[in-house]
Amino acid sequence: MVIDFTTFGSGPAPTPTDPRVLFDALPQRAARYEFLRDPQGQVLQTWYDRRSEKDLVVKLNTGGGKTVVGLLICQSSLNEGEGPVLYLAPDPFLASQAMEQAVELGVEVTDDPRSTRFTSGEAICVLSLHRFVNGKSVFGLQGDGRPVVDVGTIVVDDAHAALATVREKFTLTLSRASHEKPFDELLDLFADDLRQQSEITYQGLTTQDSSAVAPVPFWAWTRRIAEVTAVLNKLRDDQDLQWSWPLIKDVLPICRAVFTSDKLEVQPPYPPISKIASFARARRRVHLTATLADDSVLVTDFAADPSTVGAPITPTSAGYLGDRLILAPQDISASIKEAAVRDMAAKLAERVNVVVLVPSHHRATAWAQHAQITASDSEQIGAAVARLRKEHVGLVVLVNKYDGIDLPRKACEVLVLDGLPQTYGGLTRREAIVLGDSDEMVNRQLQRIEQGMGRGVRSVNDHCVVLLLGPHLSQLIASPRYRSRFSPATRAQIEFSRQVAAKLAGQPLEQIEGVIAQVLGRDPGWVAAARGALAEVTYPKSTISPVAAPARRAFNQASLGQYAQAATHMSEAVAAAKDPAERGFLQEQLAAYQHFVDAPKAQQTLVKALAHNPSILRPIEGVKPTRIKPTDTQAVLAAGYLANTYADRNEFLVGIDVLLDELVYHPSQKRVPVFERALERLGYHLGFEAQRPERATGNGPDVLWATGDLKYLVLEAKSGATSDKIWRSDVAQLAHSMSWFQETYDQSCSATPVLLHRVNTLEYNAVAPPGTRIITTGTMAQLGDAVRKATLALADAGSWSDPTAVAEQYGAHRLLAQGLAERFSVTPRSH
């Protein structure tokens, strides 16, 4: 035998590292991956040129093929020797989808992080974030003594959705139901401090009031940190806490803690992501995101480099997207009822697949008679999506799933968003209360809505009619303030859809259904116009809030015990905040850091913060109530408020619909804070001065209206009541608020006690304060009807900023202050 030694040493042909060349070289890819889409090729080329930068953001439209891009980046990095390589999806469902696409591409993947194929850099490991970020992660944790798995490259798919998972994993939740003794022990530990903040809220915790949300003051938390640590450390091996305790125990002194009636939640201000050492040490981190412009959260939560995050990788055009018609039927005609839209959707479902996204099981019940499938958990949703992609199913309802599902082609030709995504945890509900309608909270909401609207257009060849149900969703496309924050492609489709809606203004639902049929029938005129609307759309420059980087630096310093440095950085974040609500919340965090080095100064900072945001923690010495009184006539104040709040007729009408929708009595206690805020805003709409004393000072009524001539309405909201009786405790609370009024205001002022409750029948032993009025379900409807009629008249005349016109309409609909309470309320009735 003769050996040809000249063949030795040359080795196999070089493996391509350029991801576009790599794609062409994949021998086993499925037929549907015949070629890369142009936007995919563009971002892959730019990534390849910049691949040595540690934190890179790749932006593609929803449905733009981010998963394929991510997998090719992973394989390119493997071929270049930058492994092991990890591909992270926000949840198990998306991880399984990525695995399927990898197999179709012909890329070797594994879901076993212990696989030698992964650790040796020969296969991509695809995991959900749940398996990567947890207190028992097989990748090891910083400082826990276990070896840390080396990872060279990490690609995070749907990074904005992934961040919600990361926050959840860095949150310790102590359930009252399963840990009653330690829960009660900790509640007792902070009882005095919680009562100092709000006696009523504390009572809610002890009486199972699900609307109660009580943050633990930072000074009480740090004072009792040894006792807290002792209680929680005993539970370190508990089935639930073992996944979170190791992640937060080292930063426990700077965590925020919130009690609800059924849980204690503990969470650091930002995730200490360095605990996941494999993530912190990775040489390449690539974040795949949708197209929202604000990427600040990648800096605050993932500790990403703001300089590279601020220079995202995007295609040259953002117009590569399937066509959508986005309509809010109730915005087109006020006479259209939700039930009629549901009937129309059911009729459309006889011919095409209709998918309905709802925020809760309660909302899903309205669709029960029409739905072929209602799915809520991951397994049910996965099975429903598989059926939709394979065949005509009809109408499918998915509960609280606004992201992470692909419904291309005929899988979903009509998509209905019925209601806004809701926040359920104590910490997120507290943030919603404190931040309200701040830019940060609105951006979070819009991100999920945009993700939801993108479920039915997964490529340029897809089409979908999107119907928005309910006034809150209508407001998002009616208000220029909200529309401007959507991605450019979605915003262009909304603007174009609004031109269509303008042609349909005031038309019955049958006319809207006819236009929907044109879209679904692929009317050539529609297709050309829809594509033309996207022709010139480009990606925006990414925005990084000036708050993000200093706030993250402050947290990093505080987690090391460097509290003075943390306060310095946090002061920079406060100075950079423009929104008052956000500034006040950031000042609260600044005070928490200052407390470690200068407790009196921390309390002074809180006092200053209250001027920006009255919903934050109250100082130890409490807050003195401020008296309110009108500064002008009712009509002048109302016209001024309306002019400053609403830019045009449509925004005015939709805004009133949103307000009145929030003022509906609802059995969910978690909606009570929304009702109270709306009640305060109704006062401003009517031309009164208004405040929420209980929220601002921990004492007094839920809402106080100053109606003029030294007259006031003391308003106690029981909008979540389900009983057909008014309990003794409810009228006792109203009596306490009246006592507060008499102590706060002098004898020249008079107040009418008003209880907002679905009924006016008192429990047998309940005694209402003298002169009490009850706004029942019926009289609230009458009040709402009067407000709506006055609004419509002012909108049609374009005169909502004219005090004379406002006075005329408010007089015509009996909304002037004199006798207002008596007109829209009834007296209590004994049992």
Image (cartoon, rainbow, N blue to C red):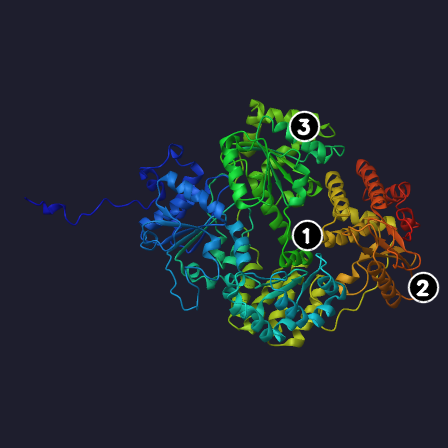
The image quadrant that residue 381 belongs to is: top right
Distance from label 2 to label 3 (Cα)? 57 Å
Side (left or right) of 810 relative to 297: right
Q: Amino acid at mark 1?
A: Asp
Q: Is residue 49 visible?
A: yes
Q: Is residue 476 visible?
A: no
Closer to the N terminus: mark 1 or mark 2?
1
Q: Nearer the viewer, mark 2 or mark 3?
A: 3
Q: What is the quadrant of the N terminus in the image?
A: top left
Query: Which residue position holds label 2?
Result: 748
Residue 437 shows which numbered tag?
1
**Quick check: 453 left or right of 308?**
right
Q: Nearer the viewer, mark 3 or mark 1?
A: 3
* C-alpha gap between disc 3 and disc 1: 32 Å
Residue at 64% x, 26% y: name it: 515
- Between 812 and 53, the one lying in front of the other is 812
Along the line of sight, the residue nearer the viewer: 185 or 493: 185
Identify which amino acid the numbered label 3 is placed on.
Ile
Residue 157 pos. (x, y %): 47, 48
**For the residue marked with disc 2, what is the amino acid?**
Ser
